[in-house]
Image (spheres, rainbow, N blue to C red):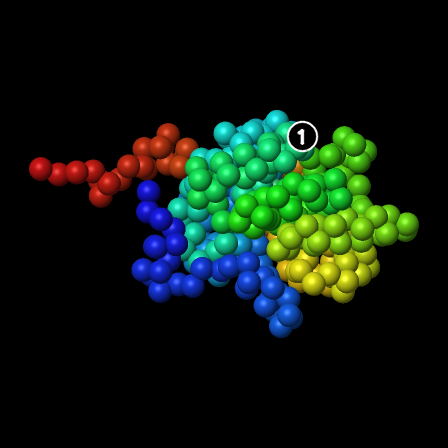
Amino acid sequence: MTDPSAAAAQAGLKRVRTRHFQTAKESGTKITGLTSYDQLTAQIFDEAGIDFLLVGDSAGNNVLGFDTTLPVTIDELIPLTRAVAGAAKRAFVIADMPFGSYETGIDEALHSAFRFMKEAHAHAVKLEGGVRSAEQIRRIVSAGIPVMAHIGFTPQSEHGLGGHRIQGRGDQVEQLLVDAHAVEDAGAFAVVLEMVTSDAAARVTRELKIPTIGVGAGPDVDGQLLVWTDWAGFSTGRIPKFVRQYANLRQALTDAAVAYQADVTSGQYPAPEHGYTD
Ligand code: KIV
């Protein structure tokens, strides 16, 4: 497989690096991210100038057919991450560490992070948790692997948190700040704030030196991340209130499939021009 960094250099594109996240925060330039799980969307989002692509464990709900992210394994995410990393010439590619791949200790966390770097060609990893994951973050970073942290609503703890609940309300803001400082001190280059109140996110963003990336955290953060299948109107089911849909791909593909079915059954496709001649 082509080395993605070499391909980017050939195309004259400058790869987004962790230092660009930091300079973006310092200059007030907003950072953009989308999830991606395959080569084709990675190419499109990369060429559109999206700064980072997260190969999220949301692949569980959007690719692998699960109801939650909990069953997702490293072995399932590695081929998806490799496809995204191979396609992205400029965007920074972050692999999500799935549930059960880093919680039991430093050795497990390092082993999992190494797999994403060596086998999947990721540029960084993301893992959930504040204080509880700080030691893992510190050790992965000291091994030379950038880490994006993830606090607020952490889907891998959905059952422990009592469902999809907004975080950072009332007194919870203090714990959010403790978690945010813990991951910054551990060396994370950025932190995702998922489903936290806008006020709490603004406060964390003011207090931290590293950039905050909001997913349902309001406007006063340093960047935004959305799950691409929600953003493009491709997902089924309940779409979170914080998502703005930028396309209606589900409808477009349904219309195309219905038209194809009608054309084939009525004999309108294939037409003579679709056939080969001697
Ligand atoms: O897996 C994912 O897509 C995520 C984002 C929603 C933050 O973790």
Foreground of the two, 187 or 158: 187
Name the outermost residue toward the bottom. 27
Residue at 48% from the left image edge and 42% from the top image edge: 117
Q: Where on the picture, by quarter, is residue 223? A: bottom right
Q: Which residue is mark 1?
A: 104
x then y, percent, for residue 64:
54, 30
Is 121 in front, or is 82?
121
Q: Is residue 275 above or below residue 87?
A: above
Tell me the kind of residue under disc 1: Thr
Residue 114 or 83: which is nearer the viewer? 114
User: Considering only vertical position in the picture, is 9 above or below 178?
Assistant: below
The percent position of residue 112, horizontal first and vertical second, equals: 55, 35
Q: Is residue 101 above or below residue 8?
A: above
Residue drawn at x 55%, y 46% is: 143
Residue occupying the point 43% across, 37% down: 119
Residue 9 seen anywhere in this rendered image of the structure: yes
The response on whether ligand 1 sits within 8 Å of label 1 is: no
